[in-house]
Image: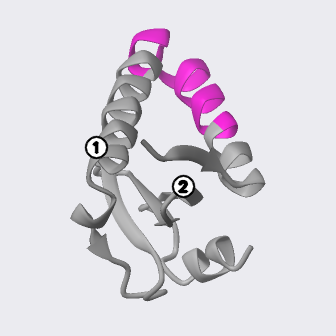
């Protein structure tokens, strides 16, 4: 099975998101998000080609975790690289900046 790697940018975004969820909402909301994220990651580990291709960058796939959050990733025979965890409420033009790195 492929190993999942988060880019530094995706890791930082995830850390901030988790902090936000716990401080502004609750630990329970944070835990529910983490559960959905884990299910999403397990899904792409099993079926990496199963998510739709991104319209922004054709080499990436995207998977909606929640209506507010989307994962952008690429994969090869050994790795799934999550390049961005994007807040869907942000300006969609900003995703281009997120996935550049």
Q: Which of the image's four quarters has the N terminus? A: top left
Q: Which mark is residue 43?
A: 1
User: Where residue 17 sits in the image (x, y, percent)?
Assistant: 59, 38
Between 62 and 29, the one lying in front of the other is: 62
Q: Which residues are magenta?
A: 15-29
Determine the image quadrant of residue 48. Answer: bottom left
Q: How many C-alpha atoms fall within 10 Å of the one at disc 1: few (<14), some, or many (≥20)?
A: some
Whichever of callouts 2 and 1 sits on the residue coming sooner in the sequence is 1
Magenta stretch: residue 18 in it?
yes
Q: How many C-alpha atoms fall within 10 Å of the one at disc 2: few (<14), some, or many (≥20)?
A: few
User: Where residue 26 sits in the image (x, y, percent)?
Assistant: 47, 14
**Residue 29, above or below 7:** above
State the CA–CA distance, disc 2 to disc 1.
16 Å
20 to the left or right of 74 = right
Between 85 and 23, the one lying in front of the other is: 85
Q: Which secondary structure dominates the residues rendered in magenta?
A: helix
Mark nearer the viewer, 2 or 1: 2
- Look at mark 2 in the image and give the residue it sits on: 78
Residue at 70% over, 55% down: 7
Between 91 and 58, the one lying in front of the other is: 58
Label pair 2/1, CB-CB below 8 angstroms: no
Q: Secondary structure at mark 2?
A: loop
Q: Which mark is residue 83?
A: none
56 to the left or right of 66 = right
User: Where residue 4 sits in the image (x, y, percent)?
Assistant: 55, 45
Residue at 65% over, 27% down: 19
Q: Which of the image's four quarters has the C terminus? A: bottom right
Q: Secondary structure at mark 1?
A: helix
Residue at 44% over, 26% down: 34
């Amino acid at each position: 099975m492929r190993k999942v790697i988060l880019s530094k940018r995706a890791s930082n975004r995830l850390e901030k998101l988790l902090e936000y969820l716990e401080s502004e909402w609750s630990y329970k909301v944070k835990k529910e998000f983490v559960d959905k994220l884990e299910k999403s990651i397990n899904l792409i580990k099993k079926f990496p080609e199963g998510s739709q291709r991104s319209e922004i960058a054709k080499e990436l796939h995207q998977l909606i975790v929640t209506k507010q959050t989307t994962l952008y990733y690429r994969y090869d025979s050994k790795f799934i690289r999550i390049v961005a965890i994007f807040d869907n409420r942000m300006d969609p033009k900003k995703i281009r900046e997120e996935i550049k790195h």
